[in-house]
């Protein structure tokens, strides 16, 4: 079954569906992003897949095509301050909730990537494990969230060039930890994500 056919089956029961996914749960720095996408019944986008399986160039191309062909889309965030206050899982849910609420169309059903769904104020949800490899709508949301977050991290790279965010996008690479050791935390680092690292360093591991 193709990603388009997966959605087509679900539309037999729910005429308006949206796909929803997040990006940026794992990094040590930056906001978490989420996107929601609604397509018309007959919209097929060739080459769409889980954003992690696509090259950066392909994601950028598909980003523009998705925005052009979507009936509705929204890209939203939850901030570093919110991550520190209510934790990353709750913030991923919050960003997805904001994205679905930001659609110009109210879906009958939201397909959520993964095994946990946010409360969407009356919109029915369906979790789809590895949904970004099964559903065209979820894959599209995955691409929008990933590309939008990567672009944001490139802006942060200009603001805080010493951390080289353009190279690692905030993820916990060896280079990133070296930069933190050298310069300390920036205003966009997530302090709670660095607690274990500092503890290990203190133990000399």
Image: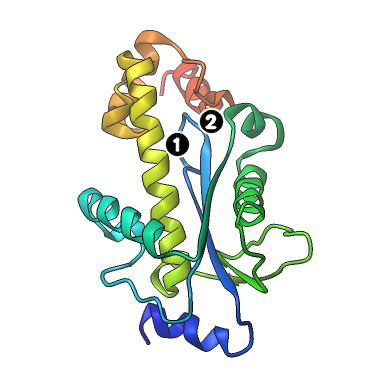
Q: Residue furthest top?
A: 183
Quadrant containing the N terminus is bottom left
Residue 193: numbered disc: 2
Give the labeled residue for mark 1.
Answer: 27
Please tell me how crowded label 1 is: few (under 14), some (14-19), or many (20+) other residues with Cα within 10 Å. Answer: some
Q: Is residue 97 left or right of residue 48?
A: right
User: Which residue: 34% across, 25% down?
Assistant: 176
- Mark nearest the camera among 1 and 2 is 1
In the rendered image of this protein, does residue 43 appear above or below residue 32?
Answer: below
User: Which residue: 34% across, 54% down?
Assistant: 63
Q: Position of residue 17 (x, y in %)?
A: 58, 73
Q: Position of residue 11 (x, y in %)?
A: 56, 84
Q: Residue 167 falls in which quadrant of the image? A: top left
Q: Is residue 84 left or right of residue 44?
A: right
> Relative to the observer, which residue lies in front, 202 or 141?
141
In the rendered image of this protein, does residue 136 appear above or below residue 144?
Answer: below
User: Which residue: 41% across, 33% down?
Assistant: 152
Q: Position of residue 89 (x, y in %)?
A: 62, 46
Q: Earlier in the sequence, mark 1 or mark 2?
A: 1
The answer to whether the residue labelled 1 contacts the one labelled 2, judged by CB atoms less than 8 Å apart, is yes
Q: Position of residue 124 (x, y in %)?
A: 71, 71
User: Which residue: 62% across, 34% down?
Assistant: 83
């Amino acid at each position: 079954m193709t990603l388009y056919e997966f959605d087509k089956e679900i539309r037999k029961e729910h005429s308006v569906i949206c796909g929803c996914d997040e990006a940026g749960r794992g990094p040590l720095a930056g906001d978490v992003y989420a996107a929601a996408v609604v397509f018309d019944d007959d919209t097929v986008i060739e080459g769409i897949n889980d954003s992690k399986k696509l090259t950066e160039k392909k994601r950028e191309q598909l980003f523009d095509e998705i925005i052009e062909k979507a009936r509705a889309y929204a890209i939203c965030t939850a901030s570093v301050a919110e991550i520190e206050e209510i934790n990353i899982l709750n913030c991923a849910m919050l960003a997805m909730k904001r994205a679905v609420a930001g659609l110009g169309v109210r879906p009958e059903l939201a397909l959520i990537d993964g095994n946990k769904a946010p409360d969407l104020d009356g919109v029915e949800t369906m979790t789809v494990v590895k949904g970004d490899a099964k559903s065209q709508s979820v894959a599209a949301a995955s691409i929008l969230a990933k590309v939008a977050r990567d672009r944001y991290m490139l802006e942060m790279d200009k603001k805080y060039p010493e951390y080289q965010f353009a190279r690692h996008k905030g993820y916990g690479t060896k280079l990133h930890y070296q930069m933190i050791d050298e310069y300390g935390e920036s205003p966009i680092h997530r302090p709670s994500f660095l607690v274990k690292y500092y503890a290990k360093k203190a133990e000399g591991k």
